[in-house]
Image (spheres, grey):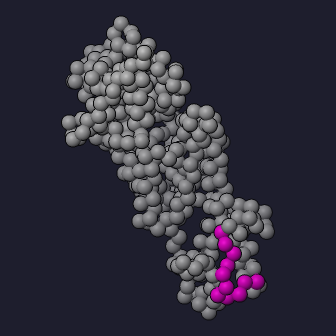
């Protein structure tokens, strides 16, 4: 097999030559995806793309429920698909929680509508000790998935990034090859890459306004990730709302600190310090549903009842269940729309690249509106029981 060119192209050339030499009988089952992977030492993405392109060319045919077969030479012209190729998209997402799943559903729907093939990679690596993502390992897996996408010469990339930007080398390579890429949920400051996000500034601002209007002037923030633009934009909105309502910015309340990644004893120590201060918070503004659930459990263990003694607010839908019954206010992010709009933007950039234009020229951030829900909009409100230990 030739050592030049993309792997999938080299595989196609070799398989095409084998069919031409009659090494496969017309109408017989063809080599499978798994056999291709083992034979050539390539990824599923590369194997599937080689097979799909040979089907598009009419060399192979697919029969529903039976597999892939060698086309009869007399029928190949009739079996051949139209010359238009729908496209291959690599989707790399950090984690598989409810929010990410909704984003992925939007991506899947957008690709399905356009006949595009989608390959999914999860970049999150969980630690065995805490169950939380290992940041360094996740970043390495993300960079590896991006390199694989480059090697496979996909038509476009949708990336839900882990904390921090990928290595500059891989981003430079993607841009040099003009492989269009769209970010979802967050963006990379200093990099001209299209991004589709929720209005995270508005999340922080409006939730803070609701809490202030409800009489909570001392609001502490509890975060998960800290080194990503979605979190930083929410913090900016929170602080701006405090300033707009003449509230002081107290460092002990507005600290950009990780809470959910801490061991249980450290989380309770943090909460005990906040609640034991001369002017304790009356509300906790939580990064997401996991932070809400964790805070509620920790507060109950400390003997603090929710919402009787302190109220909770949630900044997005990522969590094990609906936030609203446990919170006074919660943001609903347009997760599925984020995914579908990312596909729409990527298709536009792929078309520009096909026309010989730079798909990174005029990169833009598409910001979608959020909805704030209040506890009055649900029929059931949950309360935690303060179970003080002797």
Res 309 visible: yes
Q: Give percent across and percent down for residue 244.
A: 27, 20
Is 181 located above or below residue 299 in the figure?
A: below
Which residue lies at the image location 64% right of the left edge and 87% below the top edge? 27
Residue at the extreme bottom of the image, as rendered: 74
Q: Give percent across and percent down for residue 324.
A: 30, 37
Is 200 located above or below residue 222 in the figure?
A: below
Q: Quadrant of residue 149?
A: bottom right
Res 358 visible: no
Is 389 located above or below residue 348 in the figure?
A: above
> Any magenta on residue 26?
yes
Quarter of the image with the N terminus in it: bottom right
The magenta segment is 23-33
Q: Is residue 39 left or right of residue 239?
A: right
Q: What secondary structure predominates along the stretch shown in magenta?
A: loop
Q: Is residue 327 left or right of residue 118?
A: left
> Any magenta on residue 5?
no
Q: Give percent across and percent down for residue 330.
A: 31, 35
Which residue lies at the image location 57% right of the left edge and 33% below the top edge? 130
């Amino acid at each position: 097999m030739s050592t030049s060119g993309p792997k999938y192209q080299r595989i196609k050339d070799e398989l095409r030559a084998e069919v031409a030499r009659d090494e496969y009988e017309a109408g017989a089952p063809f080599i499978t995806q798994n056999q291709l992977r083992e034979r050539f030492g390539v990824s599923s993405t590369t194997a599937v793309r080689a097979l799909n392109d040979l089907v598009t060319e009419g060399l192979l045919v697919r029969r529903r429920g039976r597999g892939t077969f060698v086309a009869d030479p007399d029928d190949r012209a009739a079996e051949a698909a139209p010359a238009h190729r729908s496209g291959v998209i690599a989707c790399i997402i950090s984690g598989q929680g409810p929010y990410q799943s909704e984003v992925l559903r939007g991506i899947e729907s957008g690709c399905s509508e356009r006949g595009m093939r989608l390959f999914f990679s999860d970049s999150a690596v969980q630690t065995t000790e805490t169950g939380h993502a290992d940041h360094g390992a996740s970043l390495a897996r993300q960079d590896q998935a991006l390199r694989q996408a480059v090697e496979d010469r996909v038509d476009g990339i949708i990336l839900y990034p882990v904390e921090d930007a990928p290595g500059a080398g891989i981003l430079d390579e993607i841009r040099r090859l003009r492989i269009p890429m769209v970010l979802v949920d967050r963006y990379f400051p200093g990099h001209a890459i299209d991004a589709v996000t929720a209005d995270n500034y508005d999340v922080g601002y409006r939730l803070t306004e609701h809490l202030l209007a409800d009489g909570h002037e001392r609001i502490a923030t509890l975060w998960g990730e800290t080194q990503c633009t979605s979190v930083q934009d929410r913090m900016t909105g929170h602080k701006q709302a405090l300033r707009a309502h003449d509230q002081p910015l107290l460092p002990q309340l507005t600290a950009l600190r990780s809470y959910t990644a801490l061991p249980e004893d450290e989380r309770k120590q943090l909460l005990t310090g906040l609640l034991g201060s001369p002017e304790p918070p009356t509300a906790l503004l939580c990064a997401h549903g996991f932070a809400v659930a964790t805070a509620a459990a920790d507060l109950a263990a400390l003997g603090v009842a929710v919402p009787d003694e302190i109220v909770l607010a949630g900044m997005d839908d990522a969590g094990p269940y609906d936030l609203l019954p446990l919170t006074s206010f919660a943001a609903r992010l347009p997760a599925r729309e984020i995914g579908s709009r990312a596909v729409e933007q990527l298709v536009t950039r792929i078309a520009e690249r096909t026309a010989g234009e730079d798909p990174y020229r005029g990169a833009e951030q598409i910001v979608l509106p959020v909805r704030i829900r209040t506890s009055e909009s649900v029929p059931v409100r949950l309360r935690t029981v303060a179970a003080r230990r002797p």
